[in-house]
Image: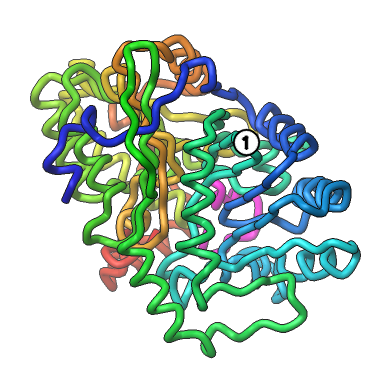
Amino acid sequence: MIARRHPVKKLPAIALSPENFNVLLSAKEFRTQLIESIRHATKRIYIVALYLENDDAGREILTEIYEAKQRNPGLDINICVDWHRAQRGLIGAASSQGNSAMYAEFAEKYEHSIPVYGIPVRGREVFGVLHLKGFIIDDKVIYSGASLNNVYLHYKDRYRFDRYHAIESTELANTMVNYVQSEMIAHPAVYDLSASSKPKTKEIKIDIRQFRSSLAQSHYKFAPQSVSDQEIGITPLVGIGKRRNFLNQTIIQMIAQAKEEIFICTPYFNFPKSVAKEVKKAIRRGVKVDIVIGDKTANDFYISPEQEFKTIGGLPYLYELNLRRFARINEANIAGRKLSIHLWKHEENSFHLKGVWVDKRYMLLTGNNLNPRAWKLDLENGLLVRDENQHLTGQFEKEKENILQHTHLIGSYMQIEQMENYPAPVQRLIRKITRVKADRVLKQIL
């Protein structure tokens, strides 16, 4: 319970010159930065993401990595993706070998192959996935909640909006690489998905259980550094499960210690009870709270009424119902401008931002969705940026402006659509879920 005993500002940190921290503002800028960094890599490339998709953008990134390896066979290259997600097709699509078929294809095609490790966080995908983030190239950490495919990288017409940051730090890069090597790749439950033979999930059930247990006790290891007034501090955090989850504890402490303002981004409005409780307490003590959420039509599971409805398409509506209830309870706080709810929508694009800003001094970069699933099931990480002297205020204010430019402010819960106006298939699904009380279970795993 380290985070509960110590104020956030006293957490051990890696010192960094503000000049070595850069906010990227678009998916295209992220893609460019990633490709250029891969092309100029001299010692290592470590890619960690939920998935590296078999589509144009995914193949482009994997090709760049393979070409770098052929030019310099001595490059230390490792890719980590979720074990389950890599071996299935897209939700609603026909059965397939998933992205693992592409990894095997590339390994066969090139002289110098590259391992793509499948990380099995749980025996079944629904109960936990690899949600750890980070692209480490030489001594640069490119951190984003994005995975690697057409929409995340804005390869074609549409994009999925996320946060993107580039950090030059040998100590941070080494820390994150060491975690991947020692806590993930080295475990017997982890296999190379590009290999010609690999076990079935049921064959490694015991290894997976042991792996999850070891992950629950793992943490980033680094030598704490003194942070001068001219520097910022960065604390890498990791967490999985309900107990001793350092990342969850730190998020709660950030909100609990806020004195002036809190700015939260989440794509799926479904706060864990502990987060909802601290947000409520913050508003009561006079802290200004801003929450940015994707409109239901900007949810990656949204299906327009003109298309054939699938069960998965009900998720955005469930999240919206959560939001409407929250807004209704907080109607007075919204009217008094103590709470501002911003809904993001930009054409046909989708919203995937996560993060917490507190008092312009503490900023969390993370892939954590701030929902029960992230809180209890998935392997998550984050980078807590401590900026006591506000060296990065300009960059973060610009990032906020960039986020808010496609939002509209909710003035009342009545502006949020109610269930009676949803398409008929959605209404039937929600009533069925509610009737059997399955909504309580779904809130814990979605």
Check the image and report above or below for 302 versus 205.
above
Q: For the magenta stretch, what is the residue range?
A: 300-313
| Crowdedness near tag 1: few (<14), some (14–19) or many (≥20) residues, C-alpha within 10 Å | some
Check the image and report above or below for 129 versus 70.
below
Quadrant position of the C terminus in the picture = bottom left
Q: Could you say whether the residue bearing mark 1 is in a helix, strand or loop?
A: loop
Residue 372 in the image: x percent, y percent?
31, 55
Query: How many numbered marks, from 0 up?
Result: 1
Residue 418 in the image: x percent, y percent?
35, 43
Check the image and report above or below for 268 versus 308.
above
Residue 222 in the image: x percent, y percent?
38, 43
**Residue at the spot 58% in from the left edge and 52% down from the top edge:** 48
Q: Nearer the viewer, residue 261 or 408?
A: 261
Q: Nearer the viewer, residue 428 or 33?
A: 33
Q: Taking 201 as reference, is 388 left or right?
A: left
Q: Nearer the viewer, residue 164 or 370?
A: 164
Q: Nearer the viewer, residue 124 or 241?
A: 241
Q: Amino acid at mark 1?
A: Asn
**Residue at the spot 29% in from the left edge and 32% down from the top edge:** 413
Residue 328 in the image: x percent, y percent?
22, 35
Check the image and report above or below for 321 versus 195.
above
Residue 341 can be seen, yes or no = no
- Is residue 312 in the magenta section? yes
Q: Main secondary structure of the magenta part?
A: loop
Q: What residue is pinned by disc 1?
A: 349
